[in-house]
Amino acid sequence: MTVRNRVAIVTGGAMGNGKGIAEVLASQGAKVAIFDKSDTLEETVRELSAKGCEVSGFKTDITDRANIDASVAAVIEKYGRIDILVNNAGVMKNLPFLETGMDNLDFHIDINIKGPWNVTQSVIPHMVKNKYGRIVTIASVTGGFVDDGGDMSYAITKSALIGFGRCLAMEFIEDGITSNIICPGYCNTPMVAKEAAEERPEDPSSFLDDLASSLPIGRLGKPQDIGFLASYLASDEAGFITGQTIIIDGGCTLPETNLDY
């Protein structure tokens, strides 16, 4: 896959699926700029750089448009262009619907919807100028395809990203820009680990084991699994793919029932 020497921004790339995406892109020769406000940003940059990857960290709050614009400008100053954008940063704080206040909904909207909106709006003029771009937006199987309840704010905001990615694909198709959406299922990330601790505080590891065994493939996804798919969609070879929503979930959306025959 040709991403070598391409300049990529990965939001939320300091941990979880974002780190897996940044790692795969960088290992395949892309120059990766991680936008993240996490305290683990510098550690991730050091770790990936020690593997021979070209990775830079930009302390960025994706709810702050001025901060985003400054980080994008810094990437342009450093590399001269932006070829790839992976909108990965996201949050999940689950509550039953009748206990969910507007503060919870606004929190999800600000990061899961307005974040990708603002980052893309800041980046895409540089892609239009160069008549080339690959945008990959990380949504979720939750909301658009499955739900266990209690995920209302997360589900509706992640579902909205499917429409966001498809509209981008159509609007910028004549500018040499593709836009695709990845919908991951359960992966072994800090977000899922947090969910395990909340669901089964006395034994979170047993929750993760049960979760893994519930998937047809028999294991949780790895962040690198998402990374390889994102890297393909970001490659030159994927230039004929746009506006597509791709599920990567170990088969969790396959069963029609939960019955054992």
Image (cartoon, rainbow, N blue to C red):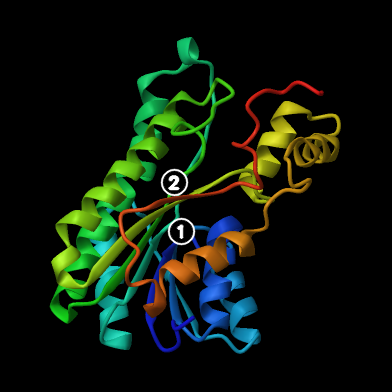
Total numbered circles: 2
Along the line of sight, which residue is nearer the eye, 121 or 254? 254
Q: Residues within 10 Å of mark 2 (few under 14, many from 20)?
A: many
For residue 51, above or below residue 176 = below
Identify the element where label 1 is drawn. loop
The residue under the point 43% across, 67% down is: 233
Q: Amino acid at mark 1?
A: Lys
Q: Residue furthest front?
A: 261
The residue under the point 52% across, 64% down is: 229
Asked if residue 14 can be seen in this view, the reply is no
Identify the residue position indicated by label 1 in the image: 37
* Disc number placed over residue 139 in the picture, else none: 2
* Disc number placed over residue 199 in the picture, else none: none
Seen in the image, is 82 located left or right of residue 189?
A: left
Q: Position of residue 52 (x, y in %)?
A: 61, 89
Quarter of the figure that contains the C terminus? top right
